[in-house]
Amino acid sequence: MCLICDRIEMIKNKENIYFVKELETGYVVLGDIQKFYGYTLSLCKIHKNELFDLEFEFRKKFLHEMTIVSNAVFNVFNCEKINYELLGNGDSHLHWHLFPRRKGDLGNYGINGKGPVWWLPYELMYSDKYVVGLDELEKMKSVLSLEIDKLLGK
């Protein structure tokens, strides 16, 4: 089983504290590490490696739901830009990384504050100092879930 499938099983078993909301094509979760405050992932319900592997109507819905989630992230986490990434080099199960970006959020790493999040040193990107407490996590999940519902017209 893959890491994303493991995370989905944790959601189904009510063991994933980062779970925000189930959508038709996937599951919305907050990132374990919040170096980029509001970092959110959308995990595809179907284990596929490539977008073109998804049935056409499911793929359209998956992409549409990702735009809804990214819009919600943008609205509630006060950012200037969203970076969208669907890499799959490490975990080939389709999943979107949605990174809220703010001016200067890369700090002083010789990259003039512009560039992809992956330019940060690994030890900074995944530092435990960016793990939010349970109260903050619950607040983040609540506002994101409400905003997704609002954008879906629920």
Image: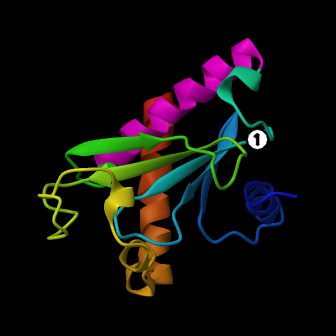
Residue 70 among those drawn in magenta = yes
Q: Secondary structure at mark 1?
A: loop
Q: At 77% across and 18% down in the image, what residue appears? A: 55
| 91 left or right, relative to 108 | right
* Segment colored magenta: 55-75
| Nearer the observer, 7 or 69 | 7
Q: Count residues near mark 1 (Cα–Cα under 10 Å), then give few for <14, some for 14-19, many for 20+.
A: some
- Label total for image: 1
| Nearer the observer, 151 or 4 | 4
Task: Answer above or below: position of 44 versus 28.
Answer: above
Task: Answer above or below: position of 101 versus 23.
Answer: below
Q: Which residue is mark 1?
A: 45
Q: At 42% across and 64% down in the image, what residue appears? A: 140
| Nearer the observer, 24 or 113 | 113
Query: Which SS does the magenta portion mostly show?
Result: helix
Task: Answer above or below: position of 72 versus 10.
Answer: above
Q: Indicate the quadrant where residue 131 lies.
A: bottom left
Task: Answer above or below: position of 69 versus 1.
Answer: above
Q: Position of residue 32 (x, y in %)?
A: 53, 71
| Nearer the observer, 140 or 49 | 49
